[in-house]
Image (tube, grey):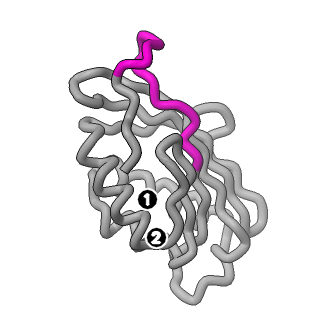
Amino acid sequence: MPEEKIDSLMRDFVKTLEKGDVEKTLSFLTEDAAWVTPEGTFKGKEELRRYLTWSIQSMSDLKVTDTGIGIMVQANKAFYEHVLEGSIQGMKCKYLAMCATSSAMAKSSVSGQFTTGCRSLNRRPRDGSQKGQWAPL
């Protein structure tokens, strides 16, 4: 898969998150995708469906912004450093997140579907307090 296509797919993936479209977001992922967050590690589409549904319902007005290196693609692997912002229970939150794709992206039998690992590093309100921490599922 051309590097430009991988970059475009990652951006489309993030747009579905911003729109709150869980099923469309899941359509970008393979069955063995994993998401690591402060709330736990979620593996496979069923766990990810539950997590994403809860996450989207918990954080309103989600906005994703490139940061650091943004999207870096090399051959059939990609890394995406970004900031997620939104409101949780009325409090503004901002945290760093990273997604990395494996070589399965280029080998997938479904065009535009990839194995990914995402990591959210921190979910604290902008004031740095512990208030607003998300509870585990």
- Taking the image as shown, residue 19 lies to the left or right of residue 11, namely left
Q: Residue furthest right?
A: 75
Amino acid at the residue labelled 2: Phe
Which type of secondary structure does the marked residue at label 2 adopt? loop
Q: Quadrant of residue 50?
A: bottom left
CB within 8 Å, label 2 to label 1: yes
Placement of the N terminus among the 4 image quadrants:
bottom right
Residue 10 place in picture, x, y as percent: 53, 58
* Pointer 1 local density, CA inside 10 Å: few below 14, some 14–19, many at least 20: some
Amino acid at the residue labelled 1: Asp
The residue that mark 2 highlights is 28
* Pointer 2 local density, CA inside 10 Å: few below 14, some 14–19, many at least 20: many
- Taking the image as shown, residue 57 lies to the left or right of residue 27, namely left
Q: Earlier in the sequence, mark 2 or mark 1?
A: 1
- Taking the image as shown, residue 23 lies to the left or right of residue 106, namely left
Q: Residue at x 22, y 24 (%)?
A: 90
Q: Residue at x 50, y 60 (%)?
A: 42
Query: Is 44 included in the stretch rendered in magenta?
Result: no
Boundaries of the magenta span: 119-131
Q: Residue at x 46, y 30 (%)?
A: 123
| Whether residue 56 is situated above or below residue 102 in the rendered picture | above
| Whether residue 93 is situated above or below residue 113 in the rendered picture | above
Q: Residue furthest bottom?
A: 109
Report how far apart the C-alphas of labels 2 and 1 lie in the structure.
9 Å
